[in-house]
Image: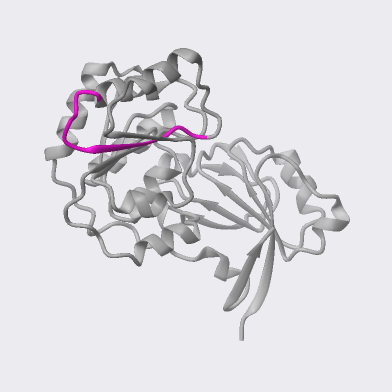
Amino acid sequence: TSKKVEFCMVENGFVSPGDEIKRYDAVLVNKKHVKYEFLRMLKGFAKKLIVIDELGEKKITADLLVNFSINPKLHKYEFPDSKPITLLGPEYFPASRAVHEALELPKKTNRQTIIVSLGGYDRSRIMDKVLMALQKDHEFRKQIILGPGFHQDAAFKDFVNSLDDTFEIHNSVNDLPRQIRDACFLISSGGNTVYEAVIVGTPVLVIGEDPHEIEQGKIFEKKGWALNMDEGKRADIEAIIDAIDNMKSREFSLDKVFQLKQWYKLLVKNPEVQVH
């Protein structure tokens, strides 16, 4: 028989009152820049405190720490209180149900779509340069996911309207892992979507926005899963055009990637997980 485990998810800093937190089996914190004082406050109320992180170099208090970064340099922590159970490496990536479902689908052999997904905000406006570079391609369909926080001014909208019918522009999509699995390759800034693409068997052109994304991209490239642009957001349009051409002809080895492990099973045996 399975036991139902209810998680209270903390992603944006909002926290339920302490008495509300106590009714959950575990509180899960998934914030890049979480503070030790905040975690210590939560730990005073939570039955179990789980922290998902990928940057390291911070003080942590928790019952379970999961850092899925592929870069071992980002696995360093201070534990002022007792050391938690610590799980490190990409095999502990918190893959969504959509990723697992995409893995069950047959892989297309003749893939003719390039997907561009540069995160929710794309602060550096890498998207503008990528779209200009992709205008040179007349061979593939281009599916562009802008992200919910992407700012579209009048000039950008005019530019999008000038693109040919090989481009599809979306603010967001519901089944991105499935679509990535069917794509020839993904263009990404190096966040969680890179892990999802590699898991479902699709290579990635990484144009990192932050330094840790560029370093992560180098490791993915060394393993044969991606092509990394070392200049990241500073890459010019011609360099991106060359990288796209390279992606089309390059051989990748995505048959031996990391195997996902279900870290939540450390809490109870055979759990039926519900997230709130």
Q: Quadrant of residue 251?
A: top left
Residue at the far top: name it. Answer: 155
| Foreground residue among 37 and 79 | 37
Q: Position of residue 119 (x, y in %)?
A: 47, 35
Q: Position of residue 247 (x, y in %)?
A: 19, 37
Above or below, 15 against 108 in this view is above
Mark yes or no: residue 260 visible: no
Q: Is residue 210 magenta?
A: no
Q: Position of residue 109 (x, y in %)?
A: 17, 56
Along the horizontal axis of the image, is 137 left or right of 236?
left
- Residue under the point 47% across and 56% down: 95
Quadrant of the frame with the C terminus: bottom right
- Residue under the point 25% across and 60% down: 107
Q: Which secondary structure type mostly characterizes the magenta part of the structure?
A: loop
Residue at the far right: name it. Answer: 19
Along the horizontal axis of the image, is 229 left or right of 38?
left
Above or below, 262 against 184 in this view is below
Q: Quadrant of residue 130?
A: top left
- Residue under the point 15% across and 31% down: 245
Residue at the far bottom: name it. Answer: 1
What is the magenta range? 135-147
Q: Position of residue 78 (x, y in %)?
A: 61, 42
Q: How many marks?
A: 0
| Foreground residue among 183 and 267 | 183
| Foreground residue among 120 and 170 | 170
Mark yes or no: residue 246 visible: yes
Q: Quadrant of residue 100?
A: bottom left
- State how the image is colored: one colour
Quadrant of the frame with the N terminus: bottom right
